[in-house]
Image: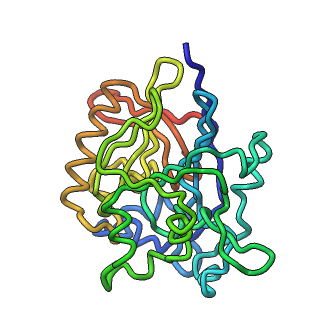
């Protein structure tokens, strides 16, 4: 039997406006559960996965990385990038990463794919890795509309194409035996989630479809969502499957609860958190 190892890593934290994260849900409904700073920003983790299977090292999402981002680090409360350090602590150097799977191309999920070398030139962080992106996500990132221009930085992903490290996907695909991507579109065009079989169960990295455990509430959909009605339907369908089939859910932005099982008690769903 093929052995799969999964480790939750982090590139650090960022801060995002609380109202943005909960969309139409009024602050009075979530403020007792969420700690915000004086600028009404809640702390989000930039969680990534290291999956080791079939002799391959796979990274799922890459955080924001270490580039300066035109002064936006202060706006988002970004500290030092930690993904490469945490990979090394797990015994994997950037040169040993074979695949990078990106849920989508918002800067806090793909910025860590590139870095500046000593000469100040953009280069891939993972020089031997193939990066998997959905075609719709790629095309949207290249030509974002006025609402989402601030979500994308071409320096994060264009070098991947220039260095021939980009693999475009068109919908659901099995990357390796037991490791698949599923196109969800909501919350953004070309958004994908990642599932991997591990010890007889399915582990699913939810990306921004369900960014934190607080967003297990079906109505909690961030204001930055492009397709809230489609996201609602997709969330409902996938969370029903997650509860029925016992999936282990991993939240891309979860801080206190980063992973867990969705269970039901007396007709009400709740999360049984675990450490991953």
Q: Nearer the viewer, residue 34 or 32?
A: 34
Q: Nearer the viewer, residue 78 or 5?
A: 5
**Colour scheme used in the picture?**
rainbow
Say if 142 sits above or below 51 in the image.
below
Residue 262 in sight in this render: yes
Say which residue appears at 32% left-offset and 85% top-offset.
146
Classify residue 136 by image quadrant.
Answer: bottom left
Say which residue appears at 65% left-offset and 58% top-offset.
11
Residue 275 in sight in this render: no
Say which residue appears at 44% left-offset and 52% top-offset.
207
Say if 170 sits above or below 121 in the image.
above
Say if 196 sits above or below 64 in the image.
above
Q: Nearer the viewer, residue 217 or 249?
A: 249
Q: Quadrant of the C terminus?
A: top right
Q: Is residue 274 left or right of residue 234?
A: right
x and y percentages locating residue 193 in the rendered image? 39, 46
Q: Nearer the viewer, residue 170 or 28?
A: 170
Say which residue appears at 63% left-offset and 75% top-offset.
77
x and y percentages locating residue 141 in the rendered image? 39, 72
x and y percentages locating residue 29 in the rendered image? 36, 62
Q: How many marks?
A: 0
Q: Quadrant of the N terminus?
A: top right
């Amino acid at each position: 039997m093929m052995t799969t190892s999964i480790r939750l890593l982090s590139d650090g934290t960022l801060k995002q406006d609380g109202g943005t994260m909960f969309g139409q849900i009024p602050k009075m409904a979530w403020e007792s559960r969420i700690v915000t700073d004086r600028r009404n920003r809640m702390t989000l983790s930039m969680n990534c996965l290291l999956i080791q299977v079939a002799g391959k090292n796979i990274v799922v999402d890459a955080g924001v990385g270490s580039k300066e981002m035109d002064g936006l680090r202060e706006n988002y409360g970004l500290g030092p990038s930690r993904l490469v350090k945490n990979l090394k602590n797990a015994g994997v150097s950037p040169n040993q990463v074979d695949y990078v799977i990106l849920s989508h191309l918002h800067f806090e999920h793909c910025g860590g794919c590139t870095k500046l070398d000593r000469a100040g030139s953009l280069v891939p962080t993972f020089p031997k890795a193939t990066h998997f992106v959905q075609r719709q996500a790629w095309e949207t990132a290249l030509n974002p509309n006025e609402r989402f221009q601030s979500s994308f930085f071409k320096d994060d992903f264009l070098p991947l194409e220039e260095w021939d490290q980009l693999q475009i996907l068109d919908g659901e695909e099995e990357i390796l035996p037991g490791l698949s991507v599923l196109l969800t579109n909501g919350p953004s065009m070309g958004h994908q989630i990642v599932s991997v079989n591990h010890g007889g169960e399915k582990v699913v990295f939810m990306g921004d479809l369900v960014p934190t455990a607080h967003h297990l509430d079906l109505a909690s959909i961030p204001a930055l969502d492009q397709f809230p009605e489609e996201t609602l339907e997709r969330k409902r369908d996938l969370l029903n499957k997650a509860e029925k089939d016992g999936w282990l859910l991993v939240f891309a932005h979860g801080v206190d609860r980063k992973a867990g099982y969705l269970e039901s008690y007396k007709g009400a769903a709740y999360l049984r958190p675990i450490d991953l």
